[in-house]
Image (cartoon, grey):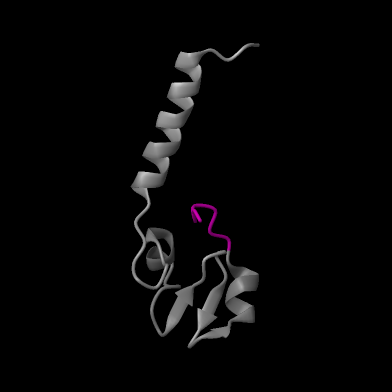
Amino acid sequence: MDMNCSDFLWLIWVFVVVFSLTSKDNDGMDDYDRRWGIAGQGKTRGILGYIYNDDEFDLWSNLIDHNQLYSY
């Protein structure tokens, strides 16, 4: 199956829409983190999606984290 120009532009449009729908706060937490109570209490999310508690790697939060909506 060949991809023509319109298919490529549609694919780019889908990526732009999906990434524009995510909203992160200053701590790197998105709506999913706020809904499940992960955000707050000094927790932040690094650039690769790891969770830190007071600037220290939070092992238990990262083990149970299943945020499939987090976009880097």
Residue under the point 51% across and 56% down: 72
Residue under the point 35% across and 46% down: 21
The total of numbered circles placed on residues is 0
Location of residue 40 in the rendering, given as x and y in whole percent from the top left corner: 38, 79
- Say above or below: 11 vs 3: below
- Say above or below: 52 vs 4: below
Location of residue 37 in the rendering, given as x and y in whole percent from the top left corner: 42, 72
Residue under the point 40% across and 61% down: 30
Location of residue 57 in the rendering, given as x and y in whole percent from the top left corner: 60, 82
Is 68 a magenta residue? yes
Please name the predominant secondary structure of the magenta segment in the image. Answer: loop
Q: Pick the residue in front: 44 or 3.
A: 3
The magenta segment is 66-72
Which corner quadrant holds the N terminus? top right
Is 54 a magenta residue? no
Location of residue 55 in the rendering, given as x and y in whole percent from the top left corner: 51, 86
Q: Is residue 22 left or right of residue 11?
A: left
Quadrant assignment, res 50: bottom right
Residue under the point 49% across and 53% down: 71
Q: Pick the residue in front: 36 or 4.
A: 4
Q: Pick the residue in front: 67 or 54.
A: 54
Q: Pick the residue in front: 4 or 65.
A: 4
- Say above or below: 6 vs 19: above
